[in-house]
Image: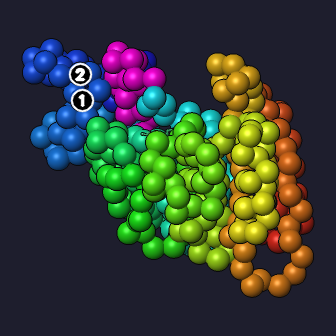
């Protein structure tokens, strides 16, 4: 028997494929039109009581198929396993607070943000920015379908933002060079020669939009601290942030070692008394290995308890 996620995916994919053909749309555009029509109630699947995660996963599968069909290599959704880990970390770092504001400055389709919001369902509201017009429209339709409160902004996230300071930035940062040198000039992490690294500027922009004591959970290249701008990044972080943790993600998630990623957790300094937390350094195991995941979570929980982050259990 099909799962509800499969039934919802078949509904989305079937409708999208039909309208793509009929209206000569790209499959990804048709997936957006389908999700929007579903959110507006013009069409609806014959599936009862689907959970928010079942809906998110079905949309994710339909979007992935749409992206593959149109060969859009730059539009990479953040995989579920990374999103769930980010949600778990945000939950642990939140010290059980009942309400959290979130921000993703590079939201794409919102898959990472919605995975985190579903993980802490009912406790979060978010702002999100994305440059790509189709991706942000998909994120908007998904937010409606999941009933997650998100304010979306279609703009360059490295320009001034209308976003109030938040408790958490959660973002899978775009990696590479930022083409707008003039705008980059306003950042401490600008390059003195040629283009700056977009992912470095995104870290700086995110730190600006955190409340004191707020945390950034960033998906970054695993070699972040080995690049040609690493010294400059170290100096910036020493002055402006506290490194809370670095978690290497399992290599199997990425197509090659060059594409490997880590999770970097930063805290915006505040006036809270007491010693700085010890830096959490860990390797996330293969997420299909239940026993290894259990011992990884136990390690993070123990670190959280020892470093002033109350554990939820
Ligand atoms: N977390 C997203 C998801 O689950 O769909 C994927 C994020 S993807 C790794 C990075 C995103 O950053 C891309 O969607 C890209 O369009 C966006 N991006 C790149 N440069 C940007 C900029 N200057 N301002 C806003 N968004 C940007």
Q: Is residue 37 left or right of residue 57?
A: left
Label 1 belongs to which residue? 29
Q: Nearer the viewer, residue 258 or 87?
A: 258
Cα–Cα gap, marks 1 and 2: 5 Å
Q: Is residue 127 visible?
A: yes
Asked which quadrant contains residue 84, the reply is: top right
Q: Nearer the viewer, residue 290 or 21?
A: 21
Q: Is residue 16 left or right of residue 87?
A: left
Residue 197 in picture, x, y percent from top left: 59, 44
Please provide the residue range marked out in magenta: 56-73
Q: Residue at x 86, y 71 (%)?
A: 276
Asked which quadrant contains residue 311, the reply is: bottom right
Q: Residue at x 30, y 34 (%)?
A: 47
Magenta region, main secondary structure: helix
Label 2 belongs to which residue? 26
Q: Nearer the viewer, residue 6 or 48?
A: 6
Q: Which mark is residue 144?
A: none
Indicate yes or no whether the magenta region holds residue 67: yes
In the image, the residue with mark 2 has its CB under 8 Å from the nearest atom of ligand 1: no
Which residue in the rendered view is the most extreme toward the left? 22
Label 2's element?
Answer: loop
Do the numbered discs 1 and 2 sit on residues whose CB atoms are within 8 Å? Answer: yes
Residue 206 in picture, x, y percent from top left: 56, 61
Asked which quadrant contains residue 4, the reply is: top left
Q: Is residue 126 left or right of residue 41?
A: right
Which residue in the rendered view is the most extreme toward the front? 193
Which quarter shows the N terminus? top left
Q: Residues within 10 Å of mark 2 (few under 14, many from 20)?
A: some
Indicate yes or no whether the magenta region holds residue 129: no
Vertical position of residue 81 compared to residue 3: above or below: below
Q: Residues within 10 Å of mark 1 (few under 14, many from 20)?
A: many
Vertical position of residue 153 compared to residue 254: above or below: below
């Amino acid at each position: 028997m099909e799962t509800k996620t499969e039934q919802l995916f078949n509904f989305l994919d079937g409708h999208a494929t039909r309208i793509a053909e009929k209206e000569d749309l790209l499959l990804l555009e048709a997936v957006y039109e389908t999700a929007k029509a579903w959110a507006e109630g013009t069409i609806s699947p014959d599936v009862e009581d689907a959970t928010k995660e079942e809906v998110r996963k079905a949309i994710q599968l339909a979007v992935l198929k749409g992206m593959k069909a149109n060969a859009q290599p730059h539009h990479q959704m953040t995989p579920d396993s990374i999103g769930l880990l980010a949600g778990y970390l945000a939950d642990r770092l939140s010290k059980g607070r009942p309400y959290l504001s979130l921000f993703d400055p590079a939201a794409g389709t919102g898959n990472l943000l919605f995975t985190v919001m579903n993980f802490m369902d009912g406790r979060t509201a978010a702002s999100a920015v994305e440059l790509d017009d189709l991706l942000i429209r998909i994120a908007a339709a998904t937010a409606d379908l999941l009933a997650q409160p998100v304010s979306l902004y279609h703009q360059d996230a490295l320009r001034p933002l209308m976003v109030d300071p938040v408790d958490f930035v959660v973002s899978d940062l775009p990696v590479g060079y930022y083409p707008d040198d003039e705008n980059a000039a306003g950042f401490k992490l600008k390059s003195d020669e040629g283009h700056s690294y977009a992912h470095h500027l995104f870290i700086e922009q995110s730190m600006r939009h955190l409340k004191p004591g707020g945390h950034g959970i960033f998906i970054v290249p695993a070699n972040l601290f080995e690049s040609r701008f690493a010294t400059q990044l170290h100096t910036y972080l020493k002055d402006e942030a506290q490194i809370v943790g670095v978690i290497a993600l399992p290599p199997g998630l990425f197509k090659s070692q060059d594409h490997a990623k880590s999770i970097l957790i930063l805290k915006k300094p505040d006036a809270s008394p007491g010693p700085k937390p010890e830096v959490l350094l860990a390797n996330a195991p293969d997420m299909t290995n239940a026993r290894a995941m259990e011992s990884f979570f136990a390690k993070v929980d123990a670190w959280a308890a020892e470093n002033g982050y109350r554990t939820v259990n």
